[in-house]
Image: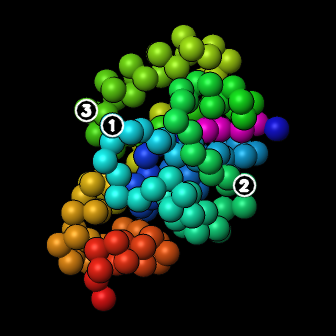
Amino acid sequence: MRSVIYPGTFDPIHSGHIDIAERASTLFDKLIFAVAVNAEKNTLFNPKERIEMIIGATEHIPNVEAYSTDGLVADFARKHKAIALIRGLRHVSDFEFEFQMATMNHHLNPDVSTLLMVTAENYIHLNSSVVKDVARLKGDVSKFVSINVLQKLKEKYSLS
C-alpha cells in the first residue's frame, strides 16, 4: 500500500488544502494528514478540532486519514510507512522554503520523497491566516471552506 503524508497546521483546512488532497489521493492508496502541533504557533483551533474539520471537509475522499503529531514529519512518515510527503505550492516564493524542508526530510528519512504540487489557480491567494482574518472581521469565507469549517469559524468568532 502506497501512503502519502500531507503535513501542515491546517488551522483551518480550506479549499486550497482540499484541492491538493483530492488530487494527491488519486495518486496514492492512502493520504494521511499530519496535523502539526507546535507550542510556538498560536493556533485558533486545537489539534482535535483541526482533525475533526479535516475529516468532515474530506469525507468525499475515501482514502483519507488524519492524525496529530508534535514530532518530526520524517519520523511520522516512517511510523506510517509512507513513501512520500505532499506539499502545495502557491507562489514561486514558497519554493525556497519547501525545497529546504524537502532536503532536510530526505536527510532524516531517505525512504520518503517530497512531491510539490502546484495549487489550483483559483486558490493561490488562500491561506489559513487570510481565512481566519476575513471570518473574524465578519467577511464571507463560504467559498473557501467547507460547511463544517464555516460553522466552526462562526462558533469561534461568535458569528451568526
Of residue 85 and residue 73, the one placed in the foreground of this image is 73
Along the polypeptide, which appears first: circle 2 or circle 3? Answer: 2
Q: Is residue 58 visible?
A: no
- In the image, which disc is placed on residue 63? 2
Q: Give the number of the mark in front: 3 or 1.
A: 1
Contact check, label 2 and label 3, Cβ < 8 Å: no
Of residue 117 and residue 136, the one placed in the foreground of this image is 136
Q: Position of residue 81 (x, y in %)?
A: 75, 30
In the displayed structure, 61 sits above or below 153; it is above
Q: Residue furthest front?
A: 39
- In the image, which disc is placed on residue 40? 1
Q: Position of residue 113 (x, y in %)?
A: 60, 24
Residue at point 28%, 74% (across, down): 157
CA neighbours of label 3 inside 10 A, class few (<14), some (14 to 19), many (20+) = few
Q: Is residue 74 magenta?
A: no
Of residue 156 and residue 77, the one placed in the foreground of this image is 156
Quadrant where the N terminus is found in the figure: top right
Secondary structure of the residue carrying numbered label 3:
helix
Q: Which residues are magenta?
A: 2-6
Q: Is residue 19 left or right of residue 30?
A: left
Quadrant where the C terminus is found in the figure: bottom left
Q: How far apart in space, not on screen, are marks 1 and 2 (Cα)?
A: 31 Å
- In the image, which disc is placed on residue 93? 3
Along the polypeptide, which appears first: circle 3 or circle 1? Answer: 1
